[in-house]
Image (tube, helix red, strand yellow):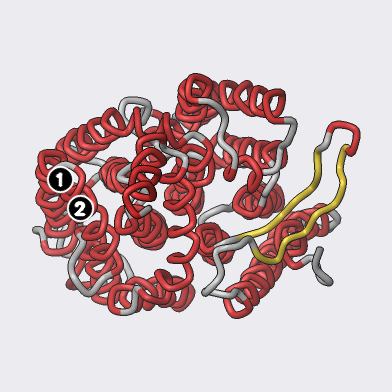
Amino acid sequence: MIEFPVLSLLTFLPLIGALLILTIRGSEEIVARNSRWAALWVSGTTFFVSLYLLFQFDGTSAEFQFVETIDWFPALGLSYTMGIDGISLFFVLLSAFLTPICVLASWTAVKTRVKEYMIAFLILETFMIGTFCALDTILFYIFFEGVLIPMFLIIGIWGGKRRVYSAYKFFLYTLLGSVLMLVALLTLYVQTGTTSIPELMEDPVGRDLQIWLWLAFFASFAVKMPMWPVHTWLPDAHVEAPTAGSVILAGVLLKMGGYGFLRFSLPMFPEASEFFAPMVFWLSVVAIIYTSLVALVQEDMKKLIAYSSVAHMGYVTLGIFTATVQGIEGAIFQMISHGLISGALFLCVGVVYDRLHTREIARYGGLVKNMPKYATVFMIMVLGSVGLPGTSGFVGEFLTLLAAFQVDTIIAAFATTGIILGAAYMLMLYRKVVFGEQVNKDAAAMSDLNPREFWYFVPLVVLVLWLGVQPGMVMDKVAPSVDKLITQYESALPLHAEGTLAEEELEE
């Protein structure tokens, strides 16, 4: 127990804000204006509360911190338990950081049902933060699945022409995998008698059961990532979602799959994770190469960036299942970095879409002449996505490839081709849009970034460059939790246990 429930405050503050927005009355114009300001103040306050976690977090400890426990259903052994460690800390910060930026990005872009839109975003923030703070399997499942509802509404109501189709595809894909995860969670509860995530991490079930449970969890997390071949919902969802919806989808929602692998698959099912690791490696490599090739032929800016997200998430799954320090730390860093870079890239698309109302690459060209500030921001984010040294994108990719090389050189060689292909499609996009021939008078007349747009890009640019030269800011706090995870994983493997026993006998 702790004196002040900071994680509960952080999780439910946006929900309280959503309820307050619900009470706003007046003309349509007044309601829209007040809803925007209320959402900005609430999400901004949530972000400042999240900074308290960063400054008070003990980076030398691998234990869960800021833990809150309240008996929920004592008869069933269920409890409301919240807590964070080095692995979940930065995902909470990322969720709280991107939400106010999304509110600002939607300021003039969303003109209809603004009140409902802001309510949906704040409820979405509650579910996102709750997912990364939950230390009880049932509580985790509620938050993890709850994210679907506001995101479904954001795509389905404020999306593009095919929004209903895309929203249903997104919902059905992710829900199908999650039903299997619910069965696995109930099986774990029946077998162990507990829903406590820390307890389940320290005492894995038998190998045969692990195999089935791992597959059930994999079905949910692989769709959420998304991994090839269950990635097809993502490009559709991104293309049809409003700009801010795409930012949250790429910036936070995709990371829930990777977080699930780190929190459930590796520590709870170590033998199954080792058994299925080669399969995950090859699926990751196929995702990296195949989606990069698909990105090369895209004519829609959003679709290109969406396919690049699938390729980048391939590096994450590759790094996680190497089960090495460099692989897991690299995967975590890659997820944080990708959240910032892909979020900013979707915002870049949103800026020009608001002016010309098309995402077709061929309709743009020569923007460097009339939009120099925009061209600079776009360039930094493209180079970050490519993995240029000095940007945050380099650190995660380098570490995951280093870990892959230690485990399997053939896998590492194939995965490295993704870096070359990534540079090809991102630089092609930038060349056509920014330096290409001006084929459109409307594009040539577009205005540069306005002050609102400029200021929500500034923190993203600063963080991408800062983390590129100072990755220790993240790594130092992540390292103890990763070391503990790997120790738990290795000690639970029978081969490792036998090897340790043999070493002890030799010493005697």
Is 458 displayed left or right of 381 in the figure?
right
The quadrant in which residue 465 appears is: bottom left
Callout 1 amino acid:
Ala
Q: Which residue is mark 1?
A: 412
Position of residue 117 measured from the top left corner of the image (x, y, whole percent): 64, 49
Is 495 displayed left or right of 369 in the figure?
right
Is 329 displayed left or right of 169 in the figure?
left
Position of residue 369 measured from the top left corner of the image (x, y, whole percent): 17, 72
> Up-down: is 506 above or below 293?
below
Q: Which residue is mark 2?
A: 401
Query: Residue at 48% of width from left, 25% of height from top?
Result: 207
Q: Residue furthest front?
A: 508
Foreground residue among 13 and 359: 13
- How packed mark 2 is, by other alpha carbons closer than 10 Å (few <14, some 14-19, many 20 or more), is many
Foreground residue among 167 and 47: 47
Q: Earlier in the sequence, mark 2 or mark 1?
A: 2
> Up-down: is 477 above or below 491?
below
Q: Residue furthest right?
A: 75
Query: Residue at 38% of width from left, 38% of height from top?
Result: 498
> Up-down: is 40 above or below 278?
below
How many discs appear? Answer: 2
Decide: marks 2, 1 in contact (CB < 8 A)? Answer: yes
Query: Residue at 10% of width from left, 59% of height from top?
Result: 436
Callout 2 amino acid:
Leu
